[in-house]
Amino acid sequence: MKRDGQPLPGKPESGASWRPPSPRYKWYLVAMLWWISFFNYADRQAIFSVFPLLEQEMGLSPVELGLLGSSFAWTYGLAAPLAGYVVDRVRRKTAILAGLHIWSLICALTALSRNFRHLLLFRAAEGLGETFYYPASMSLISDYHGKATRSRAMGLHQTSVYVGTIGGGFFAGWIGQRYGWRWSFIVFGALGILLGVVLHRFLHEAPRGAADRAEAGAGATPLRASLPLSEFFRVLARTPSALLLMGAFVCANFVAVVLLSWMPKFLYDRFQMSLAMAGLTATLFVQLASMVGSPLGGWMADALRRRTPRGRPLVQALGVLGGAPFVALCGLTPSVAVLVAALTAWGLFKGLYDANIFASVYDVMPPEARGTAAGFMNCVGWLGGGGTAPVIIGLIAQRESLGLAIALTSSVYLLAAVLLLAAAVLFMKRDVERIEREMLQAASSSRG
């Protein structure tokens, strides 16, 4: 007997006995997770488009506005290792849908805020709810998609981030300026809860490492459900490419959070745009271009990965190197037209990087540790990058200017490129070959 595509409790998981609901289900899964990820990002982006309304109603300073962005990132990052640890020990379907219901409810309850402390509390709580999604969803996708399609699957899933950011930025601003900022959070929260109810029937679990075991010829070889945390850190310590990829994620996340959190206010203040237009302009061109760049980056990485284990981080390095000059231009240009062109170019290169964030790390981490790996990666990325970026930029903007603060983040992209190239050139081939060798040895031991 099976339930949701996997054996019932007490029955061993086996790549030989388990089959997906249909041959195309691995792409249906990506489509369903796409919509959950859409609300994951729409909910977190909504607050940035109503910054001016919060500033007017509650008299918030630039640093306080920055803290609203950072509070989410700090909670998201601090809870991420726990989320990854839990995800490797429970059904991913449960973690995904429970997280969706929790963060959507918190999003709706944000409308009850009456002062800065309330907003800070709800933003932090929303980060706690959302932190389970990416470790669970990336782990689940990796069990349906092997190395031949993994970057494409994750790249297509990544487009939900861009559409969600556009939707959250525009509709929160549009609803806010017509009905008040509170209704933005009520609408997004209610829609997320409804989505969770609908998808409960159609989202199915898979055995851990199913795709990798099939590719390694180890279809019937059972995997441990998870690695002990101490063993995970030993694996991480002897995998320098993974450490460098995580360092690059810190840098890339820093830049992304700066532009997504501060660009609406930058446009509102410098170019006197309306709330809705500032929210739309800050997100539309970057995200639409990234929607092209992410599938392209996934296709490029899968194709290059067939030739060399270094393929995925090399595509990521191209993304951050190409994006760096356009990030600087965003903060320095006095022209709306040039700014739009710079945002578009940055978004295209950003997509190349984003498509391979988790696919690159999964190339060098064992399947049974991928939830923990994604959780730990989110921890360092959001604490080291997203958690510091809004406040640092707020401090620089208070002393100098917001435009200069945004432009300076291009140097952080250059550091990301150095880390990615070091991972690709020095360590990636060795670390990938070690993981593949260990899986073959496990299969051989099981058959022997």
Image (cartoon, rainbow, N blue to C red):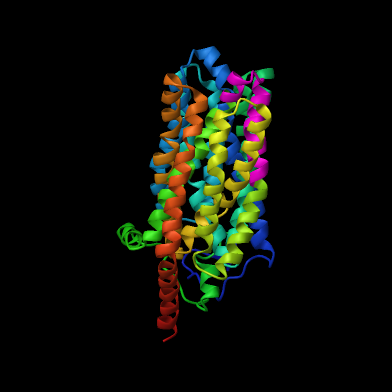
* Magenta-drawn stretch, dominant element (helix, strand or loop): helix
Tell me the quarter of the picture where residue 271 sits. Answer: top right
Residue 431 percent location from the top left of the image: 41, 67
- From the image, which quarter does the C terminus lie in? bottom left
Residue for point 59% across, 55% down: 154
Residue for point 40% across, 64% down: 427
Residue 291, relative to residue 171: is it above or below? Answer: below
Viewer-proximal residue, 307 or 206?
307
Residue 112 percent location from the top left of the image: 53, 21
Residue for point 40% across, 71% down: 434
Viewer-proximal residue, 9 or 338?
338
Viewer-proximal residue, 252 or 27?
252
Residue 267 part of the magenta-drawn span: yes
Residue 11 percent location from the top left of the image: 49, 69
Tell me the quarter of the picture where residue 42 sits. Answer: top right
Residue 116, relative to residue 144: is it above or below? Answer: above
Residue 404 part of the magenta-drawn span: no
- From the image, which quarter does the N terminus lie in? bottom right
**Residue lying farthest bottom?**
448
Residue 385, relative to residue 201: is it above or below? Answer: above
Is any atom of residue 197 visible in this view? no
Residue for point 47% across, 29% down: 405
- Residue 216 horizontal side relative to residue 365, left or right: right
Could you tell me how many numbered marks the image carries?
0
Is any atom of residue 329 visible in this view? yes
Residue 212 percent location from the top left of the image: 52, 70
Q: Which stretch appears magenta?
A: 266-290
